[in-house]
Amino acid sequence: MNQPPDLSIIIVNWNVRDLLRAGLESIDRNRADLDLEVIVVDSASGDGSAAMLAADFPWVTLIACAENVGFPRGNNLGIAKANGRYILLLNPDTVVVGQALATLLTYLQDHPDVGVVGPQLLNADGSVQSSRRRFPTLATAFFESTWLESMAPGSLLDRYYVRDVPDQQTAEVDWVTGACMMAPSAVVEAVGGLDEAYFMYSEELDWCRRIKAAGWRIVYLPEAQIIHYEGKSSEQAVVARHINFQQAKLRYFRKYHSRLAASLLRLFLLINYFLQLILEGFKGVLGHKRPLRRQRVQAYWAILRSGLHPAGY
């Protein structure tokens, strides 16, 4: 009987062929003696990603989708096909640094009470990218990634972003961002895959919350490093990115807090985008960068027309 591979790496790709190539090359270069299987779920990319995989990476298993299935569903398709004793969810816009894969795997083997471990993420210039979090409160939601962020009490966002812990210190956290997350397959089997009602954003927060609620710890491990070229897929669809981000946030608060909390947050976000639309329109009337103002007004109007209903509700 064949032994299962040490690690199944699942990558959901959408139109980032060249970054995907660099990422796969870094996996191959830094796999050491690990027995790996790599599964790429391609969400109907139009940039030749699937053809590139077939031609240049025959050791990669390709799941070619007829539509953009989103991050959670794409990963679940990969998880369903995975055979490894450990599962790594990895973004296509990442590069493995040195022995990061072996380091993450060894940590999980040595700490069976850990359900998810995430590495230190690096920006392209080598600076540390924020990737560890505590669970957001409703107050966090009103400030984080809104116009009010610059006015947030320092302690509020410091707590959320775990700024009280040095970047180079291994730490137990509430969740790690989804660019790179490794979990034992037994944990995935116990809690299930990602919630597919999210299309993109907050799905890793939800998953870590479920894993932590089931009794496992979530750990940030800076000894392992991954370069992450952040947002290269989502930046191709700016309006959809805003809508997906906010609808995911609303789903999380509807699911784990209350309908009232999600309703208040939704009202606040809609007012926020309406005020931005008015401001951008006023600047355009004054003749300040009119093409840019017109583009933003159209984007904010599209967001408002979406209604920003919680994903899946």
Image: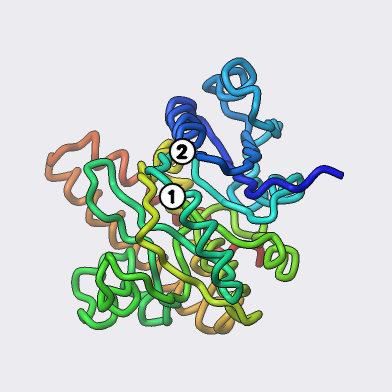
- Residue under pointer 2: 30
Q: Position of residue 93 (x, y in %)?
A: 43, 39
Seen in the picture, residue 171 relative to 57 is either above or below; the reply is: below
Three-letter code, disc 2: Asn
Q: Position of residue 178 (x, y in %)?
A: 49, 56
Is 152 positioned to the left or the right of 205 in the image? left
Q: Are the residues tagged 2 and 1 within 8 Å (C-beta)?
A: yes
| Depth check, front residue: 70 or 130 | 130
Q: Say which quadrant the N terminus sits in.
A: top right
Q: CA distance from mark 2 to mark 1?
A: 8 Å
Q: Residue at x 56, y 61 (%)?
A: 203
Is 108 positioned to the left or the right of 147 in the image? right
Q: Residue at x 52, y 22 (%)?
A: 47
Q: Secondary structure at mark 1?
A: helix
* Category of crowding for the residue at label 1, using alpha-carbon neighbours closer than 10 angstroms: few (below 14), some (14–19), many (at least 20): many
Name the residue furthest top.
Answer: 55
Q: Position of residue 241 (x, y in %)?
A: 45, 49
Name the residue furthest right.
Answer: 1
Quarter of the image where one finds residue 293: top left
Q: How many marks?
A: 2
Q: Say which quadrant the C terminus sits in.
A: bottom right
Q: Tell me which label, 2 or 1, sits earlier in the chain.
A: 2
Seen in the picture, residue 214 relative to 54 is either above or below; the reply is: below
Q: Secondary structure at mark 2?
A: loop
Q: Residue at x 50, y 72 (%)?
A: 218
Three-letter code, disc 1: Ala
Query: What is the number of the mark on residue 100?
Result: 1
